[in-house]
Image: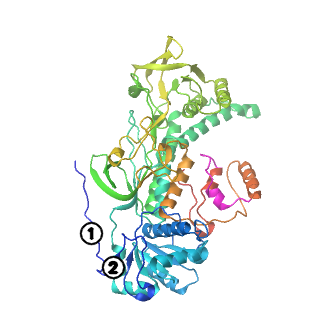
Amino acid sequence: MPCSTRTRSSSSIPKDTLRASQLSVLPMAGGERAGGRATRLQSNRADAGLRLPARPARRRARLSSPGAGRSSAAREALRRRLLGLIEGNRVMIFSKSYCPHSTRVKELFSSLGVACNILELDQVDDGANVQEVLSEITNQRTVPNIFVNKVHMGGCDRTFQAHQSGLLQKLLQEDSAYDYDLIVIGGGSGGLACAQEAAILGKKVMVLDFVVPSPQGTSWGLGGTCVNVGCIPKKLMHQAALLGQALRDARKFGWEYSQQVKHTWETMTEAIQNHIGSLNWGYRLSLREKAVAYVNSYGEFVEHHKIKATNRKGQETCYTAAKFVLATGQRPRYLGIQGDKEYCITSDDLFSLPYCPGKTLVVGASYVALECAGFLAGIGLDVTIMVRSILLRGFDQEMAEKVGSYMEQHGVKFLRKFVPVLVQQLEKGSPGKLKVVAKSTEGPETIEEIYNTVLLAIGRDSCTRKIGLEKIGVKINEKSGKIPVNDVEQTNVPYVYAVGDILEGKLELTPVAIQAGKLLARRLFAGRLEKYRVIGFHVLGPNAGEVTQGFAAAMKCGLTKQLLDDTIGIHPTCGEVFTTLEITKSSGLDITQKGC
C-alpha cells in the first residue's frame, strides 16, 4: 500500500531577501540602520551548546561558551553555537532584560501568540562576547537582535515595520522543508522525556508508538516497558508479597486474627492494570498539553528524513522530520526450542495474566527472573528457577549468591546447570499443564517436570531490526541489535539520535533514559535554565526520615538544584522525585505524579 502524503506550500519571501547559505561569514549590509536587506542564516550546527530560557520568561540563563572568546578558535566555536540557535528556533531574540525596545518586541510576538526563544545578554556568562560575535554575523551592534525562521529581521523598528507590511506574518507562516522538527520513534520513558522537552523548547514534535503483541497476544498502552510491563507492576506485585509476609509476621507482634488469609490473583492484577491505565492516560494528556502529536502506529524508515507509519488496520501514512530520535526499547528473548512461543510466557504477559500462574518454572538467572520468582513465591506459589550457569551475571557474585541463598530460605527452589530443550502442553486450561524437558549443561543427564506456567526471563533483544534503519544507513551491532552512538547520543547518520536500552554500552535503566532524553532535547534545541542553591528541604511520604537524612548530608556539602537535576534517580523509589522537580508552589500547578 503506498504512503499517503500531504502537499505543503511555502509563503514567498520578497526578491530583495538575501539567502546566504553559501557564505561562511554571513554579514548583513547596513545592519539596523540600513533599512534594506534581510539575511537568511543557515548552519549545519543545530545541536549548538548555548543555554537559554525555553520560553520568553524573565529568567537568568547560562551561556556555555568555550572560554573568554579571545582566541580565534573560541570565537569560531561561539559563532557556530549562535548560528545553531538561530537555525534551531522559529523565533530567536537576543535581548537585554532592561531594554524597553526589547520589551516592545517581546510584547509584539506575545500578542501574535508566537512562542519565542530569548537570550538575555545581560544575564548570561560572557554576554559581551556574544554581542560582539553577533555584530560580526549581522553588522548590528544593538539589541534586540531578532531572527524569524533563520531570517535576520534586525531590531525593534524594523520588526514593527515588517509587521505593518505583512512580511513578518509571511515569515512566521513559512513552512520548513519537513513536517516536524523532531519525530521520536518509541513512547517509552526516554522517548517521551525527549519529545516533551523538545516541545517545551518550542519545537514541532511527533511521537510514534506501537506495541507489537507478544506471542501470547499481550499488548499495552503508551509509556513503554517500565510503566506497563516492568518497574511499576513489578514493584506493586512485590508490595503484594510484602503485605502477605507482614500478615504472617503480625502474630509474632501480638496481632490476633482467626480468619484464613488467602491471596486472589485476579483482584491484584485488576488493581494493577487500573493503575497502569491511569498512567497511560496521564502520558497521553501530557503530550496533548504540550502539543506533541501522538500517533499509535508502527514507524519504519523508507528514505532519508522520511518515515512510514502503519496503524493497526494496516493503513500507511508518511511523515518527514529534520531530526529523529530512536527510543524503541527491547522485548523479551525466547529460547528457540519447541513449544517456547506457543506455551511459555514472559514479563510481557505476567503482569496482566488473567489467571493465577500456579506452579511456575522461571527460566533464567537475570534480575528480572529473580524478581518475578521472588514475588510469585511471596504470594504463596510453588516456584522453581532453572539456572544455566550463575546468578546475576555481571553483578558482584558474592552478593548474587547471598540473594540466591535468601530466596532458597524463603521457599524458592533452584535447578542449577540445566537448560530447557522442550516444552509440551499436556492439558489446556487457566492455567493448564506443561511438561518441561531439560538437559544438563555439564553432561548427558536430562530431567522432566510438570508445571502450570513456564516464565522465560533469559534476556532481551533490541527492537531495531525491523524499522528500516538499513535504508538510511544507520549502523547497528549485528549480534545484539544495539546502536553505537557518540557521546551526544548521535548515530553514524547525523540527523538520527538514540536513547534508552537500545544504546550499545549504556545502562539499561529508566531514570538514565529519562535524563538522557531530556538532555538530548536540550542539546539539539539549545534551551537550559540556570538553577539555584538548595536552602531548604521537606518531604511528606513513606520513610521520610530515612530520605531526609541522606539529603541533609548533601545539603551540608553544598547541594544545588542543578546537582539534583543532574542526578540519576533510583527507580522506583520515593526519594527519586527530588531529581525530577519542575513545578513551583507559586505556579499553582498540580504536582500529582503522572508517570515514571
Residue 293 in percent (x, y) is at 39, 59
Q: Residue at x 47, y 35 (%)?
A: 460
The answer to whether residue 282 is visible is no
Dot 2 falls on a residue whose secondary structure is: loop
Residue 57, placed above or below residue 253: below
User: Total label count?
Assistant: 2
Residue 536 in percent (x, y) is at 72, 62
Residue 398 in percent (x, y) is at 68, 29
Which residue is nearer to you in this view: 270 or 209? Answer: 209
Where residue 464 sits, quadrant-wise, is top left
Q: Residues within 10 Å of mark 2 (few under 14, many from 20)?
A: some
Q: Residue at x 46, y 81 (%)?
A: 139
Q: Which residue bears the numbered disc 2? A: 17
Amino acid at pointer 1: Ser
Dot 1 falls on a residue whose secondary structure is: loop
Residue 7, placed above or below residue 152: above
> Residue 565 in magenta?
yes
Residue 387 in percent (x, y) is at 55, 23
Q: Which residue bears the numbered disc 1? A: 9
Q: Which residues are magenta?
A: 558-574
